[in-house]
Image (spheres, rainbow, N blue to C red):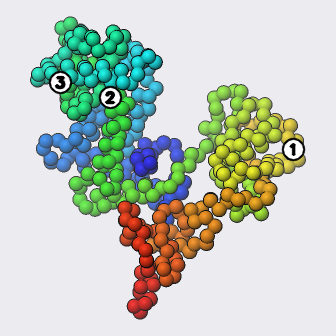
Amino acid sequence: MQLPKVVHGMGEWGCGFGTGSFALTVDSYKSAVETLSSLPLSIFLLQELKPNTQLQDVISFYQSLSKSKLVNMKDLFRFLMKLIHDARKSTSRVGDPTFKRQRTSSSWSRADVARVEEAMFRVLRAVSGSNWVSSRSLRGAVCRVASPALLENCLMELRGKVSAEGRVVNARRNPDSGSLEYRLEPRNFSARTSGNDTCVPNCPPCEEILKQDLKFLYQSILHPQTMSICSPDEIRNLAISSAEKLLDCKQFVKHYKNETLSSGNGDLICISCKLELTDQHKEVAPDPPAELVVLPVKATVSDLKIEALKVFQEVYLAFRRLQAEELVGFGGVEDSTQVKLLIGSTGSARLRVRCPGKVGVSKYRLERGMERWTVECKCGAEDDDGERMLACDVCGVWQHTKCSGTKDSEAVPAKFVCNRCIQSRCG
């Protein structure tokens, strides 16, 4: 879960800050995102380390792959996530645009494909130096491993595959015969191919490699504990602090704006619906964020009530016994009235609800249950935020274990006295 928390800010996934731990505010979160996003990639590339590190090779590879300049961290991660998105929906064969990708038949298991690929890897490993292996020779060398159809499919998907030792399969067209040829190369070698080679157009790696590179980049330049920034301490400390703040974000919220609610289907309407609990049930939970309710174009007020309750009850256990009373602002409207006539096809609505009897699950809404905690932590937190806490054995005030000097990997001490109580004793 840590990776999407941090990478989200870099790639702008369309979600907004929801709730933060350790008194993290939306302004602090936005500032941390801006700090990391604007870090120039040059601070990683200009480190005078020879030979090049894997991090430098990976960054340089994607810079060479992009049609526009990748200048900072934001550019890099947005480009990489776009490649992953495109790889998922692409139907054209990676590495050879003149052919359509042949999808693996349902009769071919992953084990079948892996067996053929490993056989091809063994052939490519056996080739000395920088020699290329023609597709015909490669197919002939492994012809007894699987059916011709599976062999052809694996050959078409071979470019960009990573061997066990970390080398990547590259492909080119032979300048004389025009046939495809393959060889194993270091990961960064394909970005620096010789001008004498008529290579297959520089296509992105497959989704598997893209995800591996995304994880590697996250661990190398985003994770606060493994960040490989050799810049001045001031920049490094600022980057680490910003990354930690992104990790402290507990929830992301998707904001549905009216102009973006349209489903694109004329037979449906999209309503942003909020619940309004009656006063006697405010302690069960505060009014939750709006949820998107999709209905048929001729849906009635009754349909909206039923579907809205269903949506909220699927999300909140404490709302499983809710009953809808009325649409706020439309109290005199009959349940048979069409919603579109009242709100339109992309409007918003507030549904007043009540909960009969006692709600036995309300105690699970907060980490502390029904207990009354007094929280006063040096980070600024004044309430339970879901992070690990401990209470002072003298005053009973709670604070984060992390803020009190106890690492996440360490057990909570059996006895604990806060600094304020220690100082009062000494005084």
Q: Residues within 10 Å of mark 1 (few under 14, many from 20)?
A: few
> Is 79 above or below relative to 146?
below
Q: Nearer the viewer, mark 2 or mark 3?
A: 3
**Sooner in the amino-acid sequence: mark 2 or mark 3:** 3
Q: Which mark is residue 420?
A: none
Give the secondary structure at mark 1.
loop
**Residue under numbered circle 1:** 333
Badge 2 amino acid: Pro
**Residue under numbered circle 2:** 205
Q: Is residue 292 left or right of residue 234?
A: right
Task: Give coordinates of residue 110: x percent, y percent.
Answer: 38, 24
Badge 1 amino acid: Val
Task: Give coordinates of residue 201: x percent, y percent.
Answer: 29, 20
Observer-nearest of 277 and 259? 277
**Residue under numbered circle 3:** 125
Residue 174 sits in quarter: top left
Q: Residues within 10 Å of mark 3 (few under 14, many from 20)?
A: some
Q: Residues within 10 Å of mark 2 (few under 14, many from 20)?
A: many
**Sooner in the amino-acid sequence: mark 1 or mark 2:** 2
Residue depicted at 45% across the width and 84% down the height: 421
Q: Residue furthest top?
A: 177
Observer-nearest of 245 and 358? 358
Residue depicted at 53% across the width and 50% down the height: 252
